[in-house]
Image (cartoon, rainbow, N blue to C red):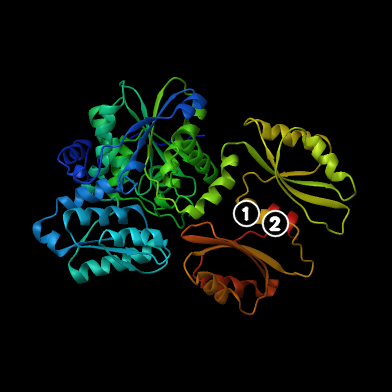
Amino acid sequence: MPDLLPPPSPTPLPGTLDGLDVLRLALTSQVYGAATETALSPAPRLSARTGNRVLLKREDQQPIFSFKLRGAYNKMSQLSAEERAQGVICASAGNHAQGVAFAGQKLGIPSVIVMPATTPDIKVQACRARGAEVILHGDSFSDAEQHALALQQERGLTFVHPYDDPLVLAGQGTIALELLRQVEGGEYTVFVPVGGGGLIAGVASILKALRPGVRVIGVEPDDSDAMYQSLQAGERVRLDSVGIFVDGVAVKQVGAYTFDLTRRYVDDWVRVSTDEVCAAIKDVFDDTRAVLEPAGALSVAGLKKYAAAHELRDRTLVALTCGANINFDRLRHVAERTEIGEQREAIVAVTIPERPGAFLEFIDLIGSRAITEFNYRYAPREDARIFVGVQLGQPGERQELLTLLRGRGYPVLDLTDDELAKVHVRHMVGGRAPEAVDERVYAFTFPERPGALHDFLSHLQGEWNISLFHYRNHGSAHGRVLAGVQVPDADLPRFEDFLSGLGYPAHEVTANPAYRLFLT
């Protein structure tokens, strides 16, 4: 269901902007020295499926395949001659970096880009090809940002913030001016992806200043929802951690300007899952043959979820497709998760008798439904446990399948929404180890860079034995590992101290039902 927000507040915070301020900055912006007015494309398949008129604002068609060029160029084009000569600096692992590099090349401004060492080489080379000086530092955005701020002071450079700057967010807001010219009719709803808030702050401020009847809906991943949490709290909050899949909006704390504008001008909110984002990537591909990055498809996922929850029909719904800079390696992960996101696949664990003919009886019961995945290994016990993917024809069919299986006496565990099962356990079925006493299982996240897996194992391999390990590269800036470690109860406090000092985010998953069923 969509996520309810407190009512928009008309009162600005001291020292902040209002909608007319943003509008004035947008009307005097210089974005079209580099950016283009992007198309508003119909999405006929999505329109037919949702029962609405769905339009895509194609910011993925900018010269750098992202809207970020607008804000970066607007900021840099209005620097003084002295500031231009001195140069600019930013910290980014993605689209903002390419926007600054592109703007620097266009304007003849020296640009320094600090990126985490985890940044894929294709993005590093894209910035260097624009003439920027690229410095790789640290394993996270925070590491890169701190180094960039230190270099700013040392070299006297101008820092170009990715979102919390009036000129940057006004540059992004020029998208709203284009929408007002492009969308026919006065009543429509715009779905905007949200990270630090620069895009939604700029777009919502201008739309509400010029056409208050247009509704603006913010969309965030359910595991990177800093703006939603801040709006609920009534103040900016800082998340302890953020999800790694929709990396383009993975921000721990939103901006001060962006928070204030968002709380005053945004109508509603919706949060979506990784699987729903993957399904949205495919939806856009089916309609346009464009492959969006996860953040680029975020608004489409939100549009679909919001329209279904509110039973919207015959409305005009606009999704801002904000970027298409996806690593090719990530498409495997997207393809694996798309069917679940569309509710066209169920993942279940089923216990069947360990005897000849039991498999066939189970398949016969499934009937005409296609089996998408089937994992099994013999074990010396009376019952066999199988990991099964089943194709579904319609959203409600998952519950029908579970009811059917349970009605025939099969113990069934629904794993469709179990992240551990989908990322790790499905690749490890049958790996039981009776000798692995005192096993505790943890999910780790570590920076995805050359040598990172070796470093991770070097830290982990100490006096405790590793009894289980699964890692798979998904083309992301961070890798995910499932590791089992044999830790006697008496050693647990010392092991927890060891984890705290390890430097890698970790949480225990020993009680996860998929692990308990297949790997113990």
Relative side of 126 to 35, left or right: right
* Circle 1: element type: helix
At label 1, counting other C-alpha atoms closer than 10 Å, the crowd grade (few under 14, some 14-19, many 20 or more) is: some
**Residue 295 location in percent, x, y?**
42, 46
Mark carried by residue 420: 1
Farthest-out residue, bottom: 463
385 versus 128 height, above or below: above
Q: Amino acid at mark 1?
A: Leu
Mark 2 vs mark 1, CA separation in Å: 8 Å
Q: Amino acid at mark 2?
A: Tyr
- Left or right: residue 456 versus residue 127 is right
Front residue (pair 368, 196): 368
**For this rendering, which residue is in front, 314 or 240?**
314
Q: Are marks 2 and 1 in contact (CB under 8 Å)?
A: yes
Residue depicted at x 46% and y 49%? 246
Task: Please state, as top left, top right, bottom left or bottom right, where the C terminus lies in the image.
Answer: bottom right
User: How many discs mark residues in the rendered view?
Assistant: 2
Identify whether 111 is placed above or below 53.
Answer: below
| Mark carried by residue 515 | 2
Expressed as whole percent of the image width and height from the top left, the position of residue 465 reads 67, 75
